[in-house]
Image (spheres, grey):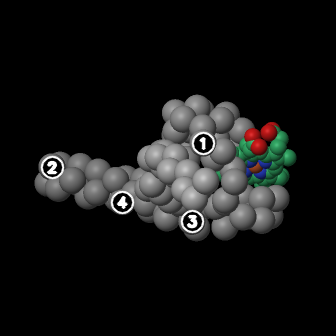
Amino acid sequence: MILAVVAVLTTTFASAQNLDAGKPAAKLFADGCSSCHRSPRGLAKGRFSLTLTWFLKDHYATSSDSAKALAAYLESVDSVPRAAEKSAPRKPRPPRPVQGQ
Ligand code: HEC
């Protein structure tokens, strides 16, 4: 009986935690950040995710879980142009032979 109560309590506690932590980061942003930041883009600015997580935890987010999720979210929306840039061919072209002189 005691075990069952403990199990129920743990389950309730765990699911209550999960409800908060499991909020999609996009929703967190829409709820808590979009009033001041119109777009999540351009906020990560290529920062390290750890620095960004610290910043968010310090300034806004209440739990480190949501700070982490937000940092990952900001990076994911921010890294699109960077990834595209990386995949672009970077090889320098050989100089064109001078012709017709
Ligand atoms: C009350 C308005 C307000 C809200 C709400 C708000 N911010 Fe900000 N945020 C600011 C201001 C103003 C700055 C610039 C000043 C600073 O860097 O401290 C800023 C700066 C930032 C920066 C750094 C950008 C840079 O240019 O260095 C990040 C990242 C950021 N906010 C993310 C968030 C996230 C994520 C949320 C939601 C959890 C959020 N903000 C909610 C006003 C807000």
Q: Earlier in the sequence, mark 3 or mark 1?
A: 3
Residue on which disc 4 sits: 15
The image shows residue 10 at horizontal and vertical percentages of 29, 51
Q: Secondary structure at mark 4?
A: helix
The verdict on label 3 being within 8 Å of ligand 1 is: no
Say few, some or many: other residues with alpha carbon within 10 Å of mark 3 (under 14 / 14 to 19 / 20 or more): some
Residue sitting at 52 percent across and 46 percent down? 95
- Label 2 to label 4: alpha-carbon separation: 18 Å
- Label 2 to label 1: alpha-carbon separation: 49 Å
- Label 4 to label 3: alpha-carbon separation: 20 Å
Residue on which disc 2 sits: 3
Q: Quadrant of residue 78?
A: bottom right
In this rendering, the answer to whether 51 lies above or below 69 is above
Q: Secondary structure at mark 3?
A: helix
The image shows residue 41 at horizontal and vertical percentages of 67, 59
In this rendering, the answer to whether 94 lies above or below 27 is above
- Amino acid type of the residue tagged 1 in the rendering: Gly
Residue on which disc 1 sits: 46
Q: Quadrant of the N terminus?
A: bottom left
